[in-house]
Image: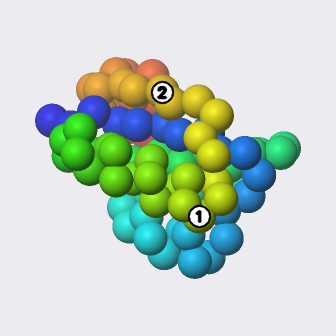
Amino acid sequence: MPELYEFTISGTIGPIIQSCLPGFSTIAETGCTVLTGTVADPAELRRLLERLDAGGAPVLDIGISNHDDAAAERGPGE
């Protein structure tokens, strides 16, 4: 199962950049945006980071977890 990535981006993500990130959910927080989704392989991860950088959305932090870990944190039935 692919790993779940969480990217913390400086500022907010506009609709154009968001449209270039199919399959990623976004959550706006104070001063940043958190993108959550899966990346198939290292080449796709590199393209995603390049796309964000080109769009003026620098990545401040990257978190990685297994889908099973995220499900365990939510608990059963959530």
Q: Tag on residue 2?
A: none
The correct choice, above or below, for 24 with respect to 37 in the image is below
Q: Which amino acid type corresponds to the residue marked 1 in the rendered image?
A: Gly
Quarter the C terminus occupies: top left
Q: Which residue is mark 1?
A: 55
Quarter the N terminus occupies: top left
Are circles 1 and 2 on residues that touch, CB within 8 Å?
no
Q: Answer with the quarter of the image where residue 8 lies.
A: top right
> Is 43 on the left-hand or right-hand side of 58?
left
Q: Answer with the quarter of the image where residue 9 lies.
A: top right
Residue 75 appears in the picture as rendered: no
Q: Position of residue 65 (x, y in %)?
A: 37, 25
Q: Position of residue 56 (x, y in %)?
A: 65, 59
Name the foreground residue: 58 vs 4: 58
> Is 32 on the left-hand or right-hand side of 60?
right
Q: Which residue is mark 2?
A: 63
> Is 62 on the left-hand or right-hand side of 70?
right
**Residue furthest out toward the right:** 30
Element marked by disc 2: strand
- In space, the residues marked 1 and 2 are separated at their CA atoms by 21 Å
Residue mark closest to the camera, 1 vs 2: 1
* Residue for point 59% across, 64% down: 55
Name the image colouring.
rainbow
Q: Position of residue 50 (x, y in %)?
A: 44, 52
Who comes first in sequence, dot 1 or dot 2? 1
Name the foreground residue: 65 vs 12: 12
* Residue for point 56% across, 69% down: 17
* Residue for point 40% across, 26% down: 64
Element marked by disc 1: loop
**Residue furthest out toward the left:** 1
Q: Position of residue 30 (x, y in %)?
A: 84, 44
